[in-house]
Image: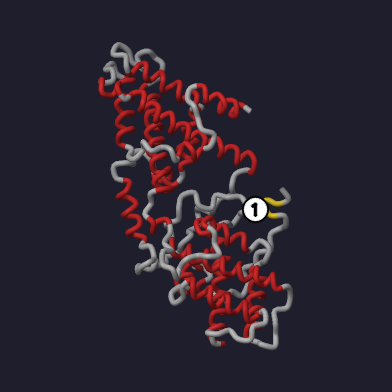
Amino acid sequence: MEQENTFQQANVIHKMDKKAFRVKFNVSFLERTDKHREFLRLLYASVIGNDALSQPMINVLNEMIEDVYTLLDWAWLEYFERLERIKKHGLSPGVAIDKPMFIDYTIDSYYPNLQYSEWIKNRRERYIGNINHLRQAEIYDESIVFTDLFNQRSITDWKCTIERWISYAIDDQNNIVDDQISSAYEVYEDYVRLQKLVECCWISIKQDANLNFQDLCPWFNKDNYPVFSTLEYAYNPYNEIYGLFHYDSLIIQKKKINNWIEATLNIDKIWEGVPADLIDFYRSMGLMIECCWVIKELGPNYPKQWNNYNNYFSTKRASDVGEKHPFKLKELKDKPEVYLQQFFKNRNLNDCRHILYECLYTALGHLENHPFSEDDIKTFKKDLIMLVEAGYLIQKAKYPNRVYLFNR
C-alpha cells in the first residue's frame, strides 16, 4: 500500500515514536502558539523575499524546525491511524448533524451545573491570542486540518518542503517564487496549513489536558457522581444509550420496569426469572439514568469528536417502535431533552441509585423497601419509564440512519 510505504519512509528525515500519544504528550514546547506562529511568519517572509532570516532566528532555527517536525509527526500518526480505522471498519455513521440535539431548553444556572454562556465565554478567553487561522469546524474536529495537510503532500514531502524553505530563508540572494519552485499563492497556502497545524495541536492539548475541571467533569458534587458509567460512557452517553436499545427494544424495557416494580410492591410476588438478569437490568437502568444526566448537564458543551464510533454486536438490533407507539411523554415527545431537566429537577443521581437498589433488593425477596413508600416507588416508576422513552427518542434522533455491524 502506497500510504504504508510513505509512512515507513517518514523516519528517514525525522525519528518518530510509534504511538501518537507519545508524541502528543511530550509536546511541552507548545505552551502557547505565538512563538511558533511568529517563527513561521518570519520563515515564510524570508522564503518569498530576498531578506534572509535575522541572526536571532537563525540561532533557534534548528530547535524550531525540530518542533515543527514533531507536530507533523503527531499529525501524521493521527491521520494514518484514522486511515487504518476507516480501512478496517469503514467510515463511522457519525451523527445527524442536520437535526438539533437540544431543542430550546434552559440549562440550570445554579451550582454545580454548567452555565452555557459562561462556559463559552471562558473557552473563548483561553483561545485569545492562540487561535488566528482555524475555522470553527476545524477547532471542533482536528481531522479536517490533518486530512487537508496530508492530502496536499505526505509527511516526507512536507519535511522536504520545509528543508527547501530553510535553504531560501538563509539565502539573501534568491527566493522560492523567482526561482519558479512555487507560486506565491502556493507558498502562502502551505504557510497557512502549517499555522493551522500549530494551532490545531495546541488546542488539542488544551482540550485533553488543560480544560477547567468543570469543563471536563461537571459531576463534582458527591450526590451527582456516575458510578455505573466508566469515563468513556460519561463522555459519550449518546453512544451508550444507543447500545442499551440493542438487545431490548423500548417496549421490552418498559415491560421489564413494570414487572420489576410489580415484584417490588407485592411481597407475595418475586421476580420471575434468573436473578442475575434483573441485576443486569438494574445496572442498565442505572447507566441509562447517568447517561441522561450527563446529557442534561453538559448540554451543547460536549467534547470534540464525541460519538464518532462504530459498534459491533453478534446479533441483530431490536426493533424500533413506530410513530403510533403510546409514549408517556406525550407533548414532550418531540423535545425529550426538556424532560431530562424535569426528571433531575428534584432528583440527583444518588437518590436514583438508592431507590433502584431498594427496588432490586425487595424484588429479589427482601420484605420491605425502606425508606421509600409505595407512592414514592410508583411515582419513580412513572418517571423512569418516561426517562427511558426520552433516552430512546434522543438516541434515535441523533442516529437516524445508523447501522450496527455484526458477525464480524
Q: Position of residue 209 (x, y in %)?
A: 41, 48
Left or right: where 14 falls relative to 287:
left
Is any part of residue 396 visible from this angle? no
Q: Position of residue 258 (x, y in %)?
A: 64, 79
Left or right: where 133 falls relative to 403:
left
Quadrant for residue 239, please give it: bottom right
Along the line of sight, the residue nearer the viewer: 291 or 193: 291
Seen in the picture, residue 361 relative to 301 is either above or below; the reply is below
- Identity of the residue drawn at 54% across and 82% down: 379
- Identity of the residue drawn at 38% across and 41% down: 202
Image quarter where the N terminus lies is top right
Quadrant for residue 28, please give it: top left
- Identity of the residue drawn at 43% across and 61% down: 298
Q: Position of residue 336 (x, y in %)?
A: 51, 68
Residue picked out by circle 1: 403
- Residue type at mark 1? Val
- Identity of the residue drawn at 54% across and 63% down: 394
